[in-house]
Amino acid sequence: MTQRLARTLMFQGTGSDVGKSLVVAGLARAFTLRGLRVMPFKPQNMSNNAAVTDDGGEIGRAQALQARAARMPLSVHMNPVLLKPQSEVGAQLVVQGQVEGNARAAEYQQIKARLMPRVLESFDRLKAKADLVLVEGAGSASEINLRRNDIANMGFARAANVPVVLIGDIDRGGVIASLAGTRTVLDPADAALIEGFIVNRFRGDPSLFADGMRMIEAFTGWNPIGLLPHFADAMRLPAEDALALNSVPVSKAFAQIRIAVPILPHVSNFDDLDPLDAEPAVELVRVRPGGVLPADADLVLLLGSKATIADLKVLKSAGFDIDIAAHLRRGKPVIGLCGGYQMLGKHVADPDGIEGPAGAMEPGLGLLDVETRLTGDKRLVAVTGRTADGNSFAGYEMHVGETVGGDCLRPFADIMGRREGAVSASGLVSGTYVHGLFADDGQRSAWLKRLGGAPSQLHYEQGVEEVLDRLARHIEQHLDLDRLLTIAR
């Protein structure tokens, strides 16, 4: 096979949540439509929303979306360092797709130096297969207090000699100061790598900010790549950051089904909600501790957790266990996904300190006759199967722990002859380790009918593809892609 000579270009931000992930996804699809073989790359990510890769590991959900935009199979090398925040043990450290232990914030600052060679190895692997590698930074480029041993932003850009485009978010205000200020605080050798800037999430008449673009160029000496208007359909794409759970829900005048979702501190894989959010007939009610699960909910859905015991304690201290018991007395169903499944059982034990103190054990909700023991082995696999009602599905498993008990004799699903999950004798309580369940149109439609709604008319995965195409056109219209290719090297 002929070795490719890939161009590379990195996108950093003036802060977190300025739209880096979305811009890279849009560019990945736009350049792919131009006939280039594009690979996304993020040296270091911090997220509890992850995806299973084709090569048997896990990466951040944003890189999975970017790979999808580029029409590339998922690889652990697209996100070689993934930090998954837990409770007392700090963050789980995932390197090239596999768990390598836990680290607290201060410890991690010392670990980063030895991770750089593996980050560069993954980057080189992608370059060998691509025409263009689009790199996403993490957080803010101006975090100079963390510059020593940095592998996520300028530390990586310097080590890999990758040119940088800086993104600022005008929607949060102060975009001129944030871009010019970044230029001021950076080490001159770091600043020299920045070739251009993008002002993102503009609303209104672009001519009103023409002077602003010229001022930023004058202050920084960087090329203006474009003023990118707010892309409203971004909400229809899977979100990586838990900040998305704080967004104001869209009002649905014709909603027929209410689904209550407790939002706990260490919630993970919350993109399980995205297909339900996309349903016009479904109203998702996200409830944080201090709130009450609505009495008229048709379903209570417990999401996954990166710290099951810690979140189980919060669930009970918030009184959600009382709300769930009342919900069941009304004859309404409950489903738990992954960590939520574990919470539904009799107890969760962590003898080896996988997610917290060694030897910890917490009584569960006792709604399923199962018990869970957290183990060091992590199951990461794409799965297909059928639920007990005969409906097929495709999804993935990403969990630690073994769950056993009498209700497992009534499995939630059959996965290639293997019993998976559990269902209570009443049929009202279900638990499964399968993520991505509701992204399957047939499976989601079956749940809507079970809850009293009409069958789904939504083609969720097709809709994501259509939004990515619209995003690519949006990017192509407002950013100078030819200049970006010229900057890339």
Image (tube, helix red, strand yellow):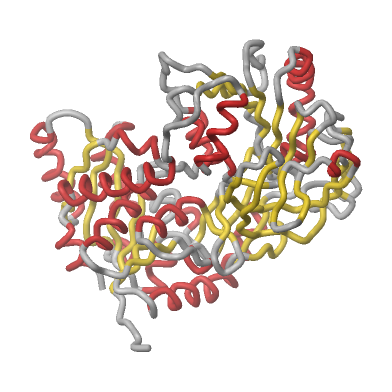
Q: Nearer the viewer, residue 334 or 61?
A: 334
Where is 130 relative to 183, above or below? below
- How far across and how far down the image is residue 255, in percent? 47, 17
Extreme residue in the front direction: 390
Image quarter (top left, top right, bottom left or bottom right) of the N terminus: bottom left
* Residue at the image position 39 percent from the left and 62 percent from the top: 40
Image quarter (top left, top right, bottom left or bottom right) of the C terminus: bottom left
Q: Is residue 413 visible?
A: yes
Q: Residue 221 lies in what quarter of the image?
A: bottom left
- How far across and how far down the image is residue 360, in percent? 88, 43
Horizontal arrangement in the rendering, residue 192 relative to residue 264 (left or right): left
Q: Is residue 318 visible?
A: no
* Residue at the image position 66 percent from the left and 53 percent from the top: 398
Q: Nearer the viewer, residue 230 or 454?
A: 454
* Residue at the image position 59 percent from the left and 43 percent from the top: 437
Q: Residue 223 lies in what quarter of the image?
A: bottom left
* Residue at the image position 57 percent from the left and 39 percent from the top: 443
Image label count: 0
Where is 347 relative to 26, above or below? above
- How far across and how far down the image is residue 357, in percent? 84, 47
Horizontal arrangement in the rendering, residue 404 relative to residue 127 (left or right): right
Q: Residue 410 lies in what quarter of the image?
A: top right
Horizontal arrangement in the rendering, residue 180 relative to residue 44 (left or right): left
- How far across and how far down the image is residue 199, in percent? 24, 43
Horizontal arrangement in the rendering, residue 51 relative to residue 457 (left or right): right
Q: Nearer the viewer, residue 171 or 465?
A: 465
